[in-house]
Image: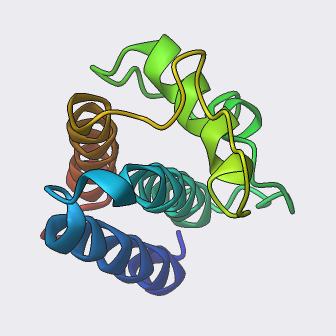
Amino acid sequence: MSLKMAKEWLKSASFDLENISYIIKVEHLSGVVAFHAQQAIEKSLKAYLAYNEIDIPKTHKLQSLLGRVDIEFKVDDNILQLIDKLYIDSRYPGDLGLLPYGQPTLEDAKEFYESAQTVFDEICRVAGVES
């Protein structure tokens, strides 16, 4: 098990979660919350793979990474799919059309944050790392 590499991935994920904590109440940054939530989840999943010495694919797709992890998270799969979709859209300016109703709402952003925190906490628990 590569606990050292897992800890590095989790440290990086914690920075994304910390970024979210600063902007979670700023409505016009809800798309940025989606970006950081996706990053926190991606890095947490890669920490799990590192911890279990499973090759880490060069992908940002959460669904692909989730297929390599044998944990069932208490997170709505539809939310994870939405976060995955918003990841790319949130990075570019212009008429984003991120969701059918436009920019994610603050309620969406909170759900993204909670989902990312849930995945992070569970992987920390499995790896025996304090979250």
Q: Is residue 14 left or right of residue 35?
A: left
Q: Residue at x 26, y 51 (%)?
A: 27
Q: Residue furthest front?
A: 95
Q: Is residue 100 left or right of residue 24?
A: right
Q: How many marks?
A: 0
The one of 42 and 91 positioned closer to us in this rendering: 91
Q: Residue at x 52, y 51 (%)?
A: 38
Residue 61 x/y as whole percent: 75, 43
Asked if residue 44 is positioned above or below residue 73 in the image, the reply reads: below
Asked if residue 22 is positioned above or below residue 64 in the image, the reply reads: below
Asked if residue 128 is positioned above or below residue 63 in the image, the reply reads: below
Q: Is residue 56 left or right of residue 11?
A: right
Q: Residue furthest right?
A: 58
Residue 88 x/y as whole percent: 74, 51
* Corner quadrant of residue 8: bottom left
Q: Is residue 80 left or right of residue 10?
A: right
The one of 69 and 64 positioned closer to us in this rendering: 64
Residue 10 x/y as whole percent: 38, 72
Residue 73 x/y as whole percent: 35, 25
Q: Residue at x 51, y 18 (%)?
A: 101
Colouring scheme, one of rainbow, by chain, secondary structure, one colour: rainbow
Q: Residue at x 40, y 70 (%)?
A: 13
The one of 50 and 88 positioned closer to us in this rendering: 88
The one of 23 and 101 positioned closer to us in this rendering: 101
- Which quarter of the image is occupied by the C terminus? bottom left
